[in-house]
Amino acid sequence: MRVPNTFRLLTLFICALAFGDVWAAAPAPLNERAPALVLRDVEGRMHDLSDYRGKVVLINFWATWCEPCRMEMPSMQRLSEKLTGKRFALLAVNLDEPEARVRAFLKQIHFDEPVLLDVNKAIAKRWGARVLPTTFVVGPDGRVRYRLVGEMDWSSDSALAIVSELLAGT
């Protein structure tokens, strides 16, 4: 049986309404206390989000098999480079992949930021990162100020404006 186009469009519209906050096109403003985040990076160093208090922290949940994740990583690197010397940090949280696979991927790209390993998805669950990529921007006060589900050009003027606003304390 062939489904009429109007039925398909109506179904898509209903899904868009129901899941609109999940498929956000721009970072959604928030003001929530950041969940705990304590993970080891690929170099063996521990990272605790509480140690970053006073900085704007971009936390990106990603995986090597996620093409949009792979596409946005260079733009996150460029954003970090633009903010060198500022109170900014970037944490890329890999979601439950073997460390060898993550290391092999990192050898293929230029990415100087800490890559944390969420080996059992506990941190992703705590943060509500169910779709990849998902990115959170945490303000200097330790509160989650923005969430974005999906990829973004993090080196864009709009992304820089979001981070700069938080750095300025406005």
Image (spheres, rainbow, N blue to C red):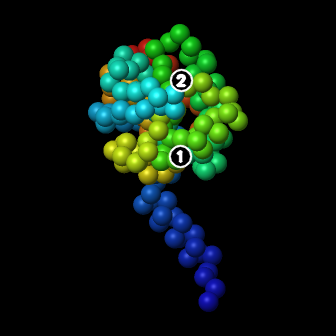
Q: Position of residue 90 (x, y in %)?
A: 50, 26
Q: Would residue 141 be visible to someone looking at this image?
A: yes
Mark with earlier residue (1, 2): 1
C-alpha separation, residue under disc 1 versus residue under disc 2: 35 Å
What residue lies at 46% left-to-right and 14% top-to-bottom? 87
What residue lies at 43% left-to-right and 42% top-to-bottom? 118
The residue nearer to you, when weighing 30 against 14, is 30
The amino acid marked with disc number 2 is Ala
- In the picture, the quarter occupied by the N terminus is bottom right
Crowd rating for badge 2 (residues with CA inside 10 Å; few <14, some 14–19, many 20+): few
101 above or below 157?
A: below
Give the residue number, with chain letter if any, for mark 2: 161
Give the residue number, with chain letter if any, for mark 1: 98
What residue lies at 65% left-to-right and 39% top-to-bottom? 104
Q: Position of residue 55 (x, y in %)?
A: 41, 18
- In the picture, the quarter occupied by the C terminus is top left
For this view, does 68 lie left or right of residue 33?
Answer: right
The residue nearer to you, when weighing 119 against 141, is 119
The image's mark for residue 25 is none
The residue nearer to you, when weighing 121 against 7, is 121
Q: Position of residue 145 (x, y in %)?
A: 39, 31
For this view, does 162 lie left or right of residue 142?
Answer: right
